[in-house]
Image (cartoon, helix red, strand yellow):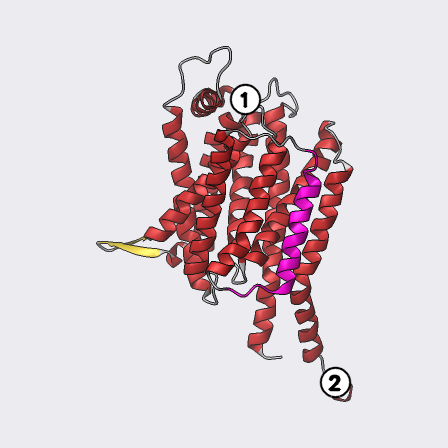
């Protein structure tokens, strides 16, 4: 097998290392976030709201993003802005739009956990399953050929979501419909822009897109959170609405949170760093040169498996409920989907090894 063919096989297998990185960040991220917001940490007096931890966790994500790009030496891949003798990285118009929609994904995901009287299970099913459905649509618009294993993996991933999240409350409100629609629109725009500007053979173009999107998304999100915190009510009434609780939590995250104790501050900073890790690995998975119908199920499958592992961890160490049979069945479907999606690359690697092995009479 030629050097180019062997390099192609290594590239095809590389996405699974990214998937492992995504899983390795997502599992402790999910478990620690749940522990902090349920008051499960040792010596934790009271749970924190998900809104209160957002400012510090996003700020930690911002620092993590800057350190990662610097250590990798990836700033050079971004479009450069000349300022005298200085050359500074900057995003383009389209990567700025993609970064803004990346921030939209984070905001809408957080808001989905705040709505009262609506099943979180059902909303998560719509959001995750919706992205799986969007993937082949973006491939069709970009005229990318979708291979058979990708279709099978897509179907298995969708089935896993329906099985793992069985039994939700299927009521919806206007606000939740708008939130889910904004989430899916954000993912559609991101995938569409990636398909148009990256996801090709040119690795430098893929890295440039990733760097420029990341340098917009997290700073823009932190800025939005700060602006929203300014609209927090002076005092919460007896029955505060979703918006009042959201903005008041953000305000507390920028102010009184730092008096919660070193343990909680350290835990939330860790949440932010792990969150950035999921953003890095998840973004690189989506930027893989293969079709979205392949990359999105890899991304979603990693998060489902990480969620199951996080549930087991909380059950073992924090006496939370064990994953039920439906969740385990969904995880089994995910494992099957991963096997189907990875089979072509694994078979190619095996073929390459066989072709490179010396013949018996050459030994």
Q: Name the element at disc 1.
A: loop
Q: Is residue 274 left or right of residue 312?
A: left
- The mark found on residue 81 in the picture is none
Q: Is residue 99 left or right of residue 347?
A: left
Nearest the camera: 316 or 73?
316
Residue at 21 percent across and 54 percent down: it is 84
Q: Name the element at disc 2.
A: loop
In the image, which is nearer the foreground, mark 2 or mark 1?
A: 2
Residue underneath mark 2 = 359
Horizontal and vertical percent for residue 176? 51, 32
Residue at 60 percent across and 50 percent down: it is 21
Q: Is residue 156 magenta?
A: yes
| Label 2–label 1 contact, CB within 8 A | no
Q: Residues within 10 Å of mark 1 (few under 14, many from 20)?
A: few
Horizontal and vertical percent for residue 196? 42, 60
**Looking at the image, is 147 positioned above or below residue 130?**
below
Residue underneath mark 1 = 261
| Residue stretch in magenta | 144-167
Residue at 72 percent across and 45 percent down: it is 331
Horizontal and vertical percent for residue 159? 68, 48
Observer able to see residue 232:
yes
Horizontal and vertical percent for residue 338? 68, 55
Q: Is residue 202 magenta?
A: no
Which quadrant of the structure image shows residue 328? top right
Q: Residue furthest bottom?
A: 361
């Amino acid at each position: 097998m030629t050097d180019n063919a062997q390099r192609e096989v290594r590239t095809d297998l590389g996405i699974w290392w990214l998937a492992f990185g995504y899983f390795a960040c997502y599992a402790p991220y999910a478990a620690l976030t749940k522990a902090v917001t349920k008051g499960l940490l040792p010596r934790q007096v009271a749970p924190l709201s998900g809104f209160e931890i957002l400012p510090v966790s996003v700020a930690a994500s911002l620092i993590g993003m800057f350190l990662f790009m610097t250590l990798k030496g990836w700033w050079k891949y971004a479009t450069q802005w000349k300022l005298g003798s200085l050359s500074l990285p900057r995003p383009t118009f389209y990567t700025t739009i993609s970064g803004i929609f990346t921030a939209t994904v984070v905001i809408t995901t957080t808001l989905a956990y705040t709505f009262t009287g609506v099943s979180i299970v059902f909303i998560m099913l719509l959001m995750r399953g919706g992205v799986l459905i969007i993937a082949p649509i973006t491939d069709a618009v970009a005229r990318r050929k979708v291979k058979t294993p990708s279709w099978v993996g897509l179907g298995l991933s969708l089935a896993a979501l329906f099985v793992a999240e069985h039994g939700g409350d299927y009521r919806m409100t206007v606000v939740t419909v708008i939130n889910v629609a904004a989430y899916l629109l954000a993912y559609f725009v991101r995938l569409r822009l990636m398909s148009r500007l990256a996801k090709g053979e040119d690795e430098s173009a893929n890295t440039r897109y990733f760097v420029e999107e990341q340098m917009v998304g997290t700073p823009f999100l932190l800025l939005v959170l700060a602006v929203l915190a300014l609209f927090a009510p002076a005092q919460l009434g007896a029955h505060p609405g979703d918006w009042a609780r959201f903005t008041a939590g953000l305000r507390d995250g920028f102010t009184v949170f730092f008096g919660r104790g070193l343990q909680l501050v350290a835990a939330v900073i860790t949440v932010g760093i792990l969150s950035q890790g999921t953003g890095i690995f998840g973004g690189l998975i989506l930027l893989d040169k293969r079709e979205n119908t392949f990359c999105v199920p890899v991304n979603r499958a990693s998060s489902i498996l990480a969620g199951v592992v996080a549930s087991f961890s909380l059950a073992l160490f924090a006496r939370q409920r064990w994953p039920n049979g439906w969740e385990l069945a969904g995880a089994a479907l995910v494992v099957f989907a991963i096997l189907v999606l990875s089979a072509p690359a694994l078979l190619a690697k095996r073929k390459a090894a066989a072709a490179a092995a010396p013949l018996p009479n050459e030994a």
